[in-house]
Image (spheres, rainbow, N blue to C red):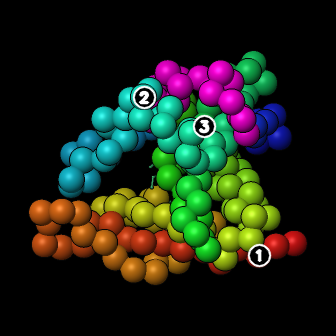
Amino acid sequence: MTSSIEITVPQVPENVPFERLVEILLAAFAFQDDIVDPPSSAKSVTVSELQWRFARDSLFLAIDPSGKVVGQIWVEDIGKDAYLYKLSVDPAIKGGGIGKALVETACDFAAKRGKEKMRLHVRVELEDNIAFFRSRGFEIAGEGIHDGYDRPTFWKMARDLIVD
Ligand SMILES: CC(C)(COP(=O)(O)OP(=O)(O)OC[C@H]1O[C@@H](n2cnc3c(N)ncnc32)[C@H](O)[C@@H]1OP(=O)(O)O)[C@@H](O)C(=O)NCCC(=O)NCCS
C-alpha cells in the first residue's frame, strides 16, 4: 500500500486541499465520539483553522496514485523539540501503513532541522492509538489535564530524534 503512496509537503496554500483535509479529520476522528471526554478538538475543525495553522506549521500530505489526499500530519516547531498533531488517515484505507509513513516523514523532517524530540498528546482512553505511537518509538513522558477536569485526560508522549 505505502509503496504507491506519495508524501508531499505543500509550500503554498493554493496547493492545499483544505476542504478535503477537514473531511478526512471529521471521518478519521468520528470513532472517538462517545469514547473521549472532553470531545476531540478535531470535531470542530474548520478550513479557516487549517489555513492559519498552515501559515505557522508544516503540513505533510499522503497522496494516492489517483492524486487523492488520503492522510495528513501537522508539525509545529516548539523550540528545541517539535510537536505533531492532527495525524489522520482516510478510514477507508486505515491499517495500510500510511499513518506510519506520515509519522516517520515528520520525524525525519524535524530531526534534520535539529529538533531533539518529537512530542504529541494522546487521549488516555485511546489504547489503540497509544499502542500505535509506542510501535513508532514514542513513550509516555507525562500527563495532562484539560481545563475543568480533575483527572489526567491525555498523555504526553515523546520520541528521541536521531539524525542519520
Ligand atoms: C492512527 C492512524 C493515523 C494510524 O494510521 P494507519 O494508516 O491506520 O496506521 P498504519 O497502518 O500506518 O499503522 C500500523 C502500525 O501501527 C501499529 N498499530 C496500530 N494499531 C495498533 C494497535 N492497536 N496495537 C498495536 N499496534 C498497533 C502496528 O504495529 C502497525 O505497525 P507494523 O506495520 O509494524 O505492524 C489512523 O488509524 C487514524 O487516522 N486514526 C484516527 C485519527 C486518530 O486517532 N489520530 C491520532 C490522534 S492521537
Is 25 included in the stretch rendered in magenta? yes
Q: Name the mark on residue 162.
A: 1
Is any atom of residue 93 visible in this view? no
Q: Quadrant of the N terminus?
A: top right
Mark 1: is the Cβ under 8 angstroms from ligand 1? no
Q: Callout 1: 10 Å neighbours few (<14), some, many (20+)? A: some
Instruction: Answer left or right for 71 relative to 62.
Output: left
Question: Main SS of the magenta segment?
Answer: helix
User: Which of the two discs, 2 and 1, labels the residue nearer the N terminus?
Assistant: 2
In the rendered structure, which segment of residues is drawn in magenta?
A: 9-26
The kind of residue tagged 1 is Ile
Disc 2 designates what residue? 48
**Rendered view: 55 above or below 35:** above
Q: Amino acid at mark 2?
A: Ser
In the picture of the structure, the residue carrying the numbered disc 3 is 71
Query: Relative to residue 90, is residue 141 depicted above or below?
Result: below
Q: Label 3 sits on what residue type?
A: Gly
